[in-house]
Amino acid sequence: MEKEPLEDFDEFEATLQKIDDILKGGPEADAAAETKAKTAEDFERLDVDKVRLRVRENRTVINKREPQSQMTDTQDQQGFMREVERDANERAQARAKSEYEAELQRSQGNEAFRKGKFEKAILHYGKAIERVKNSATTYNNRALCYIRLRNYRRAVEDCQYVLDKLQETNLRAWLYKATAFKRLKDEERFEQSVAKAREHNPLQLAYIEKYIGQIEEEA
């Protein structure tokens, strides 16, 4: 069955409309052209140097140099720790040697004291102090030697060093200091020293009273 002239005309008109849309750039053609134009515009704006620089930085700085920097930091830290450990070991060895030599001198000083050789004992105690300066026992022993030699002011100095630098509560230092002031007839400082001895050593009051009684009898 042949088409009616009107239908043929309508089909022909539709065909012409499509052709006209294509030639003028219809909606579909506009979308494709816009995408193409946008792509072309982006490509024109693209900085090729920046792209190359970014790739080069990623490959060289991040992939190659950073691990090398981390390795160097690790090596430096390990070297530092080894140096610290070696220094600590050397200090410990030097300290042990000094303590051994100080103990030897102190023992010789004690032996000299028992024999009544107070000057010799003082020399040994002095050598012990040169090696270990924070021994309250050595200072107190030397202070007692000074008391026996009636060098009371030197005895006070040794006792004061113990109380100021080493141990404020040290009972022997307070009692030897009190003894020195008693022999110097400085009653005020004698009483102050006894009071401090009691204050810092409340559990030793019986011993303190007995010691003070002996000092007063000898005076």
Image (cartoon, rainbow, N blue to C red):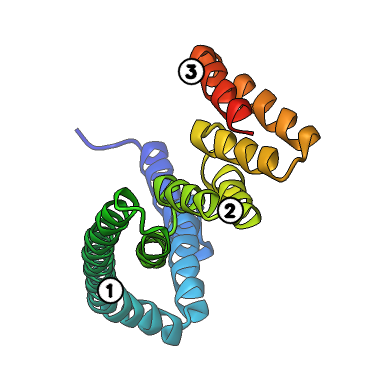
Question: Which of the marked residues, 3 or 1, is nearer the chain's N terminus?
Answer: 1
Outermost residue toward the front? 218
Question: Which of the marked residues, 1 or 2, is nearer the chain's N terminus?
Answer: 1
Q: Is residue 108 left or right of residue 198?
A: left
User: What residue sits 63% from the left and 27% below the top?
Assistant: 216
For badge 1, the amino acid type reads: Asp
Tag 3 residue: 207
Q: Is residue 145 left or right of residue 115?
A: right
The span from disc 3 to disc 2 (Cα, nearest Å) is 24 Å
In the rendered view, would you say 80 is above or below 102?
below
Nearest the camera: 201 or 16?
A: 201
Per the rendering, the mark at residue 192 is none
- Label 3 neighbourhood size at 10 Å, few (<14), some (14-19), many (20+)? few
Mark 3 and mark 2 residues within 8 Å of each other at the beta carbon: no
User: What residue sits 19% from the left and 32% below the top?
Assistant: 1
For badge 3, the amino acid type reads: Tyr
Per the rendering, the mark at residue 76 is 1
- Label 2 neighbourhood size at 10 Å, few (<14), some (14-19), many (20+)? some
Q: Is residue 144 left or right of residue 185?
A: left
Tag 2 residue: 150
Discs 3/2, front: 2
Question: Which of the marked residues, 3 or 2, is nearer the chain's N terminus?
Answer: 2
